[in-house]
Amino acid sequence: MAAFAESEFLRSRLLRSYEVMLGFLGLCRGTGDDGRSEIGPGRGFLARSAVWTSPYNHNQLRISRILRCLGLLGLKAEAEALYEFLVSMVGSGDTGISATTMDYWMRSIADPLAG
């Protein structure tokens, strides 16, 4: 954690890896009018989201790890942007993402060290 806090290079590489994972999920990262990071649907969102929105899907565990990793390694704003998108997605339609999963993701944002 200390190395990431001190190194812009490490954070930039982590951000690059994060963007690869967003692509896998069918999501993309952009910047809002306020300059903050925003997450939204990307290329192939409908097809890709089917991979991770079904109930009890192992890809939801990957999202948990992404949220925790970003928070622990100095990219908390990115974790919060992803979480905000997930909340809006679940709130706007029928997904297989359970309330239990959403609660776990919320806790991953609030305290990434808690497992």
Image (cartoon, rainbow, N blue to C red):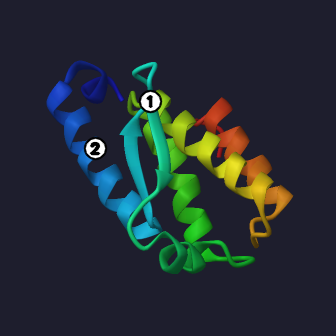
The residue positioned 65% from the left and 77% from the top of the image is 57
Q: Which residue is mark 1?
A: 32
**Residue 9 to residue 57: above or below:** above
Q: Secondary structure at mark 2?
A: helix
Q: Position of residue 105 (x, y in %)?
A: 68, 48
Mark 1 Cα within 10 Å, few/some/many (few <14, many 20+)? few
User: Number of callouts in the render?
Assistant: 2
User: Toward which corner of the image does residue 78 lie, by quadrant?
Assistant: top left
Instruction: Kindly check if marks 1 and 2 are in contact, taking CB atoms under 8 A apart as contact.
Output: no
**Residue 16 to residue 9: above or below:** below
Q: Position of residue 58 (x, y in %)?
A: 60, 75
Q: Which residue is mark 2?
A: 14
Q: Name which of mark 1 and mark 2 comes first in the sequence.
A: 2
Q: Amino acid at mark 2?
A: Leu
Q: Amino acid at mark 1?
A: Gly
Judging depth in this view, the residue of 106 and 32 nearest the camera is: 32
The residue positioned 28% from the left and 29% from the top of the image is 4
**Residue 54 to residue 78: above or below:** below
Mark 2 Cα within 10 Å, few/some/many (few <14, many 20+)? some
The residue positioned 59% from the left and 64% from the top of the image is 61
The residue positioned 30% from the left and 22% from the top of the image is 5
Residue reaching furthest to the front? 33
**Which quadrant of the rendered structure holds the N terminus?**
top left
Left of 78 or right of it: where is 88? right
